[in-house]
Image (cartoon, helix red, strand yellow):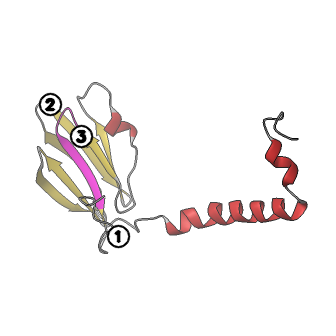
Amino acid sequence: MFRDSPAHWLAFFRPGDWLVLLAALLWVGVSFPLLWQGGKGERAIIRQQGKVFMELALDKDRELRVPGPLGETQIVIANGQARVAADPGPRQYCVRQGWLSQAGEIAICAPNQVSLAIVGNQEAPYDSLNY
């Protein structure tokens, strides 16, 4: 009967069904930013060629340069946040990540083998090796 219409299933929805669907969408929209967070970042871990180059607290503003195979990667820490400000890599993906402030956020400059990760005091809620 309704198979000719691409949205034949919509005919079965009643006003209460739309209300439940709307409430569910609102719940997801509100709970996502509240529950899907790594917490506030407290330290920045900078890796160079897979090894920890430096670990810094985010409470002190500073700027540093990390040498890599292609050149220097510039990292800036300010106002409890960190970012890769400049990188010699061709696509600039790590620079486009912008400011990182939440635990679990990471910017990877793959061609230059430099990464910036934000960590907090709490343990990670998952094991990325088993993901």
Report the amino acid beneath label 2: Gly
Q: Main secondary structure of the magenta part?
A: strand
> For numbered disc 3, what is the local secondary structure?
strand
Q: State the SS at label 2.
A: loop
User: Local crowd at mark 3 within 10 Å, few (<14), some, or many (≥20)?
Assistant: some
Magenta stretch in the rendered image:
109-118
Residue at (14, 30) in percent of width and height: 71
* Numbered badge on residue 125: 1
User: In the rendered view of the protein, which quadrant contains the C terminus?
Assistant: bottom left
* Foreground of the two, 66 or 60: 66
Q: Which residue is mark 3?
A: 74
Residue at 88% across, 41% down = 1
- Dot placed on the residue nearer the N-terminal end, 1 or 3: 3
Residue placed farthest to the top in the image?
90
Viewer-proximal residue, 17 or 70? Answer: 17
In the image: residue 127, left or right of residue 68: right
Side (left or right) of 125 relative to 4: left
In front: label 2 or label 1: 1
Farthest bottom residue? Answer: 122
Residue that badge 2 annotates: 71
